[in-house]
Image: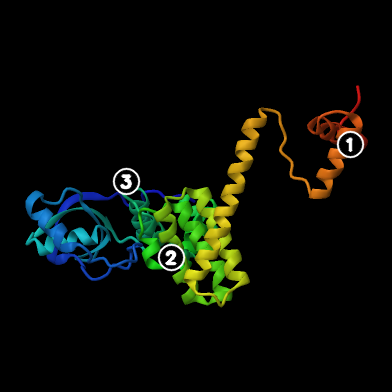
Amino acid sequence: MSLRMLSPKPRYEFIPIDKIELKPGEYNVRRRDIEKEVDELAANIKQYGILQPIIVNKIGDKYIPIAGQRRALAAQKAGLKEVPAIVYENLDKRQAIEISLSETIHRVEVTDVDLMDAVTSLYEQYGSVKAVAQLLGKSETWVRKYLKMEKKLPDEVKKDEKLGVETKATLAELSAKTASVLGEDKAKELTTKVAEEIKKEGLKTEDARRLVKAVVETASEAPTKSVEEIIKVAKSLYEKEQARKEEEKKAQELAGPGALIVKLPEDAHKALEEASKVKMRAKEDVAAEYIIDGLYRDGYLKRA
């Protein structure tokens, strides 16, 4: 099953605004405050009119909004008597929700919050991740990601457009993994502060994951620490790990292509120095010889 426009075929017409049900719509998959920024939109409509028709389901002599309820509210506030609309008739609830969802996820300006709303609304409607994935033509992993973000992220993190969706998914994992040791409230506070840290440092997705990993480890080992202390310790661990990776990268660049950087314990270093003296060869050459001999011995390399 995939999203599709449903029969009967809709028609385009102007409809009287006093016939539109302007209370919160049962078909609307956007779950946030529908009246937000209506005044600004009403002023825009007064100047330019409605540039995009609303979508409605006509039942009897009433029109129930499927998409564009905010536009209809703003049009009423702007004093319009009628609005342009794409009109369906007598759709059942499932059909109307599918159309509402289709309009939501295909908007150019669709936000992560809109997608969380849509996926959660569908999950509540159809009851399984598999059904939602089939309806959207998405993977079950994709659906679970948005469900987890909706359930676990603090509202301010959900709405933050400076954070990418993968970073938000990582922060949802942070909230989920720390809730059991910190409690829901402290876990969400920690998640919000870590999100601020990620933005402040301008961390990319992979670096954000490494910081979150350090935060989870620190919170699990010291759950009684304050949120600020957990982040301080985690940042120290993260910075040490970043420095180690940078050192490895520089060493690899100096060694050149084909080189292998290997960390050895102190006693192995001493043994390699001794073998180097006896064989009167460089340590790197002796180490390479032992590695190759070991691969032959264990059957990973075959002699010609």
User: Going from the N terminus, do you reach mark 3 or mark 1 first?
Assistant: 3
Could you tell whether 200 is left or right of 37 in the image?
right
According to the image, label 3 marks what residue? 108
Q: Dot 1, crowdedness within 10 Å: few (<14), some or many (≥20)?
A: some
| Residue pictured at 35% horizontal, 60% vertical | 159
Q: Do the residues labelled 2 and 1 touch (CB within 8 Å)?
A: no
Residue 238: which numbered mark, if any? Answer: none
How far apart are the alpha carbons under marks 2 and 1? 52 Å
| Residue pictured at 32% horizontal, 48% vertical | 107
* Amino acid type, mark 1: Ala
Q: Give the structural element (helix, strand or loop) at label 1.
A: helix
Q: Position of residue 197 (x, y in %)?
A: 43, 59
* Amino acid type, mark 3: Val
Residue 275: which numbered mark, if any? Answer: 1
Depth check: give the residue in front, 215 or 115: 215
According to the image, label 2 marks what residue? 193
From what the image shows, is residue 254 above or below residue 119?
A: above
Quarter placement of the C terminus: top right
Foreground: disc 2 or disc 1: 1
Q: Is residue 175 visible in this depiction of the protein?
A: no
Depth check: give the residue in front, 95 or 297: 297
User: Going from the N terminus, do you reach mark 3 or mark 2 first?
Assistant: 3
Q: Give the structural element (helix, strand or loop) at label 3.
A: loop
User: Going from the N terminus, do you reach mark 2 or mark 1 first?
Assistant: 2
